[in-house]
Amino acid sequence: MSKKSLSFGVPGLSTAIAVSFLVAGCAAQSGGSAVGWYNGHNGVAPRPDRTYVCHGFGCTYKTPVDFTRRDLNRLRAILSRGRGSPAAERRAIARAVSWQERSVAKPVGSSGDIGGLDMQNAGKRGQMDCIDEATNTTSLLLVAEKNGFLRHHAVSAPVSRGFFLDGRYPHATAAVREIKSGEVYAVDSWRRGNGSPPDIIGMHAWMSRSGGI
């Protein structure tokens, strides 16, 4: 997380009440515009052939990366392996996120990005906190959506968990909504280092995890 992330516990707060607030917040956030995320988090929305990769924590640095025709064909090929079902498409999305992280590592300088809570790297080029990761994954997903590469999912606004009242570190993730069922899934690439597959789990399960873990 970024340096400004704080966590306070409130003695006696009911766990059930805290969880109910979080689940309600989850539904509200995931229903918003994915593009609206960029205005509030220092990011730049992608174009169909360009993303602005955030790094340095909190999108301190933004490196433009263009998708060539070859890149778009590769992204389409990766995602086409998930055409058979929503579950298969989520697995394909995980492969696409890993591919993007490896592909942009050289121009961004992120090959050594460390996963998880690594406060000592705040402000360093090529290192990413959860805001950077959520933004970058959302950008990739929007490029895929704009180019018609997703069949079973729509891109949702990133979702946050953890706030002052529940005693958890704030944390954010990219998200997709399964079109048929309406279920929202976290696409969380923050916990592991560069190029590793992201966690893709149901949003309620993601919300129940400890913040920042």
Image: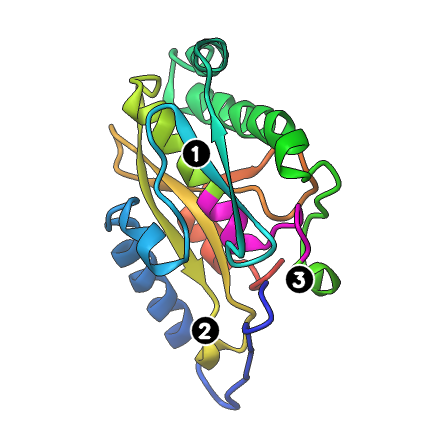
Q: Does the image show residue 32?
A: yes
Corner quadrant of residue 45 = top left
Residue 41, image quadrant = bottom left
The part of the chain drawn in magenta is 124-135
Residue toward you, 49 or 203 = 49
Numbered disc 2: secondary structure? loop
Amino acid, disc 2: Phe
Closer mark to the observer between disc 3 and disc 2 = 3
Q: Earlier in the sequence, mark 3 or mark 2?
A: 3
- Callout 3 environment at 10 Å: few (<14), some (14 to 19), or many (20+)? some
Residue underneath mark 1? 51
Amino acid at circle 1: Thr
| Image position of 159 with respect to 201: above or below | below
Residue 37 x %, y %:
33, 52
Q: Which residue is mark 3?
A: 122
How many numbered marks are there? Answer: 3
* Residue ID at (72%, 36%): 111
In the rendered image, residue 125 lying in the magenta stretch gets the answer yes
Residue on which the image places disc 2: 163
Q: Report the amino acid beneath label 3.
A: Ala
Image quarter (top left, top right, bottom left or bottom right) of the C terminus:
bottom right
